[in-house]
Image: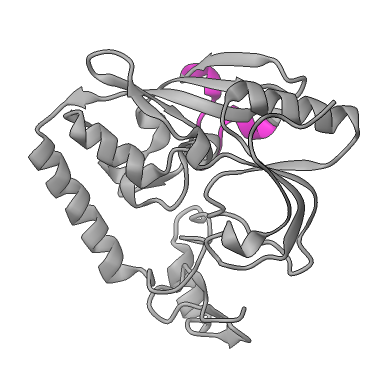
Amino acid sequence: QSLPSGTVLTGEPMARHTTFRVGGPADVMVLADSGADIQKTVALCREENYPFIILGNGSNVLVRDGGIRGCVILMGEGYSCVVPSGEDAVYAHAGARNNRFAETCMELGLAGCEFISGIPGTIGGAVFMNAGAYGSETSDIVKAVRALDREGNFLELTREEMGFSYRHSLAAEREMIILGAEFQLKKGNPAEIAARIADLNGRRRDRQPLEYPSAGSTFKRPVGGYAAALIEQAGLKGTQIGGAAVSAKHAGFVVNLGGA
């Protein structure tokens, strides 16, 4: 039995696939290009008792210099389609990058997902952890989710069945693999949507250390407070060990200043 038809890489440096730009080689990497390929790869890994992980944009991941023993199933360019699924809805593969997803919706004249454009990651990760920004969350626009369960069965779940909460969904509890999702949006003017995206991304550039590799906003918000404020109050803003530092621009970010 062989790995599926998608490209298979060996000894692939994970620094090429994480936004921290850190990480040694993965033993095996499978570049997924279909839900069936992902299902087959997962089944093979489980049969052989071979460890595997699912990766999108690598934006919430820190990989050690020693790399990853096992298989990395990468949902990237080969699994990133965003297509209309009705007058005011779209379906996106898990590997679709959030910014490209928002741009496609803008081109289709569909509003409601502008907030997601600046979140570094993919649709799969956004659904899995209910990513959010500027007062909106992924769960606000999800209509249905397609996933694999632990046994490798295809699932279709409604937004209600996903059990979304702050940076959490049922997928984390049940170890599901998100394959894609349908999003319910609303008709809008492409120029106005583009202006909102530009405004939000401008705010990000002004406030966040986008000039350095990072994993985006590093911490969950504690109840009744903000992580960045607490870190700053502790006197840790700008603290550096080797090439890794708490950003001097925004204490909620850990950044790679080079060589971390």
Quadrant that contains the C terminus: bottom right
Q: How many marks?
A: 0
In the rendered image, which quarter is residue 192 located in?
Answer: top left
**Where 109 falls versus 121 (above or below)?**
above
Q: Who's the residue at 57% across and 86% down the image? A: 240
Q: Position of residue 39 (x, y in %)?
A: 69, 24
**Left or right of 125: which side holds 87?**
left
Colour mapping used in the image: one colour
Q: Who's the residue at 83% across and 42% down the image? A: 51
**Where 68 falls versus 123 (above or below)?**
below
User: Can residue 136 be seen?
Assistant: no
**Where 167 falls versus 211 (above or below)?**
above
In the rendered image, which quarter is residue 251 located in?
Answer: bottom left
Between 50 and 111, the one lying in front of the other is: 50
Q: Who's the residue at 64% across and 21% down the image? A: 36
Q: Position of residue 189 (x, y in %)?
A: 9, 33
* Magenta range: 160-173
Q: Position of residue 209 (x, y in %)?
A: 38, 72
**Left or right of 231: which side holds 88?**
left
Q: Who's the residue at 33% across and 15% down the image? A: 85
**Left or right of 87: which side holds 146?**
right
Quadrant that contains the N terminus: top right
Q: Position of residue 58 (x, y in %)?
A: 57, 53
**Left or right of 185: which side holds 208?**
right
